[in-house]
Image: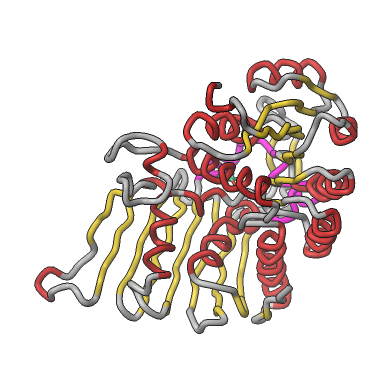
Amino acid sequence: MMRQAGKKTVRVGMVGYRFMGKVHSNAYRGVPFFFDTEVVPILQGIAGRDEDAVKREAQILGFATYETDWRRLIERDDIDVIDIVTPNHMHADIAIAAAEAGKHVISEKPLAMTTEQGRQMLDAVQKAGVVHMVCHNYRFAPAVQFAKKLIEEGRIGQIRHIRAQYIQDWLMDPNTPLTWRLQKDVTGTGTLGDIGSHIIDLARFLVGEFSEVVGMWDMIVKQRPLGENSTEMGEVTVDDACSFLARFHNGAMGVFEATRFAGGNRAGNRFEINGEKGSIRWDLENMNSLQVYFQDDEPALQGFRTIHCTGEHHPYTSAYWPTGHSIGYEHTFINLMVNFMQGISTGVSPSPSFEDGLRNQYVLEAVEQSILSRQWVAVQSI
Ligand code: SOE
């Protein structure tokens, strides 16, 4: 850890340790390995209720200590950052307690269960003056950052359309057990909040703010086994699939789809944006490539071309490998954590902040209300 010499450090306390816990831990370790940030994270403590499991995970993930109560982690003087990788229903209590204790806070998405909770979380971090961030990692894929650059440079002109999907297939087997992601009181909404929130974030990042939405959703498998080999069944209480139409304040139109029943699509997180002068396409399953079309290309050569965003001219990539060498899903989180570390060193919360999380939550709420009322619903603004 030579690059750590003489640097300021922030001591991270993480609550939770499963999939996202592993991803975040890997990202913190990657920051000083690849980037020269002012502030460097230290994996100081981890919390989880099951002592044997949390002790084991602390060792695997590289945390110095563990706690079996997240409140104890927040009370500790040797923790500067609280990282929330728990199921959604715990985000608000942990984030608010962390902010009140003066800790910087980073939370997995969606920010909250409701807009009311999201508002309380934003108020708490603003009142405490701590740095905050929500983990919409896909913005930090180099090809997505490059798309943003092209849009800001006016290369596709005024945006007219976005069609975005996050379609998966991991629930197609009706014997797949009921997980917390399928229980309303733990997760809030199903596909809408879990993966729909990611494409909402990408749309807000690349196109702008939503003005109104109308949606529909469906619950496809209504009961599932409670565990791997269980014959006992539990109720699925959230959407398995959700689609919605949107209008943006800048006049653009949007078509969005989230499902866990799109056979063959393991991580079909894709968008196409069409502007007056060109189009841009991205697909997580080919995440280092960006397809672009420019209307002012010579007519005989017009068509989509593919840019492999792995070169020195593309955002973030030169921190990793020489031109042409691909990076993966985990690097989107390293890039995100680099922004978080920079935010801590400047005192300015990077985007996506809790404010972005709340704006995202307003879109989720409007989609849900539109489905329940079978009407278009205006998206509240902050
Ligand atoms: C499961 O649907 C999941 O792991 C989401 O929770 C993540 O946010 C998404 O990035 C991948 O799929």
Q: Quadrant of the C terminus?
A: bottom right
The relative height of residue 127 versus residue 23 in the rendered view (above or below) is below
The relative height of residue 290 versus residue 151 in the rendered view (above or below) is above
Is residue 187 inside the magenta stretch? yes
Front residue of 5/293: it is: 5
Task: Please state the horizontal and vertical placement of residue 93, each as a whole percent of the image.
Answer: 86, 47
Q: In the rendered view, does 57 fall on the left or right side of 162? A: right
Magenta part mainly helix, strand or loop? Answer: loop
Is residue 218 inside the magenta stretch? no
Q: Quadrant of residue 278?
A: bottom left
Q: Which residues are magenta?
A: 169-189
- Ligand 1 quarter of the rendering: top right
Q: Quadrant of residue 212?
A: bottom right
Front residue of 64/66: it is: 64
Which residue is depicted at the point 54% across and 72% down? 208
Which residue is depicted at the point 66% across and 46% down? 345
Q: Quadrant of the N terminus?
A: top right
In the picture as drawn, the residue positioned furthest to the bottom comes out as 251
Which residue is depicted at the point 72% across and 72% down? 369
Task: Please state the horizontal and vertical placement of residue 171, each as a whole percent of the image.
Answer: 57, 43
